[in-house]
Image (cartoon, rainbow, N blue to C red):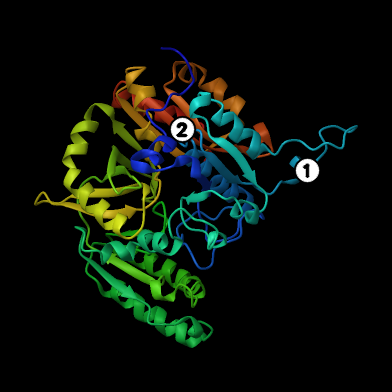
Amino acid sequence: MSSSQVELTSTLKELYSLDGGNSDDVALVYAFPNPTQLASSLPVSHKYAYQGPRTMKLSKDTMARFCLGCLAQYYGFIAGPMDLYLFDIDQTPPELAPVSNTSLAKSVPTHRSDAKRVFANLPEAQRPKLSFVEDAQTVAGVEKKKAVITPMDFLDGHGALVDQDAHWDLLSKRTLALSGLPSPPTEVIDSVLHADQTGDVAVLEKETERMLEGIASRALPFVVKLPMGLGGHAVFMVKKEEQRQSCLTILRAELPSMFESLTHENEAKKPVSLLVQDVVSGLSDGVSIFITKAGRPVYISTSEQILNERDEWSGGFMDYTRQEARGKQYHELIEKITGYVYQRGYYGPMGVDVMTDADGQQLIVDMNIRQTGSYTLGLMKKHFYEQRNLPLGGLICPIAVQGDRDHFEEKFAEEIHDGSLVIAAWCGSPRGMLGYSACGLLLGAKDREQMQALMAKVASMAVKK
């Protein structure tokens, strides 16, 4: 088969419809969270605060194009014909200029045209019903239940599909550590402060040093996690003394912001805490499942994670020929996880990162009660393997590449035409060829050598850091 159109194995619409679910009553409201406000369309969340001290320091517009454009599109790529709401990115001066000197009409914002072009690659029967949000209160008033990647303050009391307090609690790394589910031994260091104490600088400094003492004195190696971090941006692998000192420096700067996020509404959930975890040797598998409205787990896929030089998640590999065996391998663990999560009020897409220790015990090193990056790759089996006989799938998301989409497609014309490269997200800068584009790419290959060659070709176009 030689066509660039993508046919997904299944969609979120089909999964939300299982076991008495009604996907027609669900709208997807997607934005990847950030600790700061990125656009006027989406107010920053204070109650449901998130942490990312290791996130690269980029401009507000650049972060918006990654979090509200690229990543939100990427998660929405597998929606199917469901209502999908993406938040508008504030327009820059080049976008606000008239289309011509003789017209007052403004050009279509690049993030909108980019998103429509991405989803046009799907057949109409699997294409999201896309809308853009200029004002968060508009989507809050939509009558359908809202499914989100992570809770957002403005949706409290406005029909979230899953209770937001319960969802936020399940997303916390602290919850996993105290859950009783099989996971590496973890020390939980909670702050003892209350919201009304966060204005006293001397108290905050004393509490910061108290919380960091366990990290300063602990024997190497270990892992430090913040409770509400995403994508590896709040995880520290500490194997050397210099890594310990770097971790301590970053956390001394981050803890004051975490104390500021403490409110009377969220303090009972202990959002200010540190998790210090034993290191488990070996590779981590990302297991994706869907929990139906009736509480039944549907196995989606298992992938191998790709971490960048900063130990942050940046993609994954998937062997489609081994998926049935992987589902059986993790069946019992999936049942345990589903029972725990469903009992606490969640249903929908989710993922867990699993490692197997020297004794053969499967340990949950992270539990992502939300749609994950590798989820999309699992639903590409039909496109890559069944239709094109490409047994290995890969994903790179997000990545910043040089130039605009037309330039990128010229470089990868053959791969796009034969379907071995799929653009699942694209959000360019208004500067076009002179700028950058944030994108999410899905790759198919015959073997690892071919996959690595394709990934290297993509990397050659990446913006140099």
Res 102 visible = yes
At a point 29% along the width and 75% down the height, the residue shown is 214
At a point 89% along the width and 33% down the height, the residue shown is 101
- Where's residue 33, x and y in %? 50, 55
- Where's residue 165, x and y in %? 43, 64
Q: Nearer the viewer, residue 426 or 132?
A: 132
Q: Amino acid at mark 2?
A: Leu
Q: Secondary structure at mark 2?
A: strand
Asked if residue 390 is positioned above or below residue 372 in the image, the reply reads above
Mark 2: few/some/many CA within 10 Å (<14, 14-19, 20+) = many
At a point 27% along the width and 59% down the height, the residue shown is 239
- Where's residue 360, x and y in %? 11, 49
Q: Secondary structure at mark 1?
A: helix
Mark 1: few/some/many CA within 10 Å (<14, 14-19, 20+) = some
Q: Which residue is mark 1?
A: 96
Distance from the alpha carbon under mark 2 to that under mark 1: 29 Å
At a point 48% along the width and 58% down the height, the residue shown is 151
Please report contact status of discs 2 and 1: CB closer than 8 Å, yes or no: no
Asked if residue 182 is positioned above or below residue 208 in the image, the reply reads above
Res 465 visible = no
Asked if residue 121 is positioned above or below residue 209 in the image, the reply reads above
Residue 462 marker:
none
- Say which quarter of the image contains residue 113: top right
**Sequence-earlier tag: 2 or 1:** 1
Q: Residue furthest front?
A: 20
Q: Nearer the viewer, residue 75 or 53?
A: 75
Q: Nearer the viewer, residue 373 or 434?
A: 373
In-image side of 137 versus 337 (left or right): right
Q: Which residue is mark 2?
A: 441
Q: Amino acid at mark 1?
A: Leu
Q: Residue furthest top?
A: 1
Asked if residue 188 is positioned above or below residue 135 in the image, the reply reads below
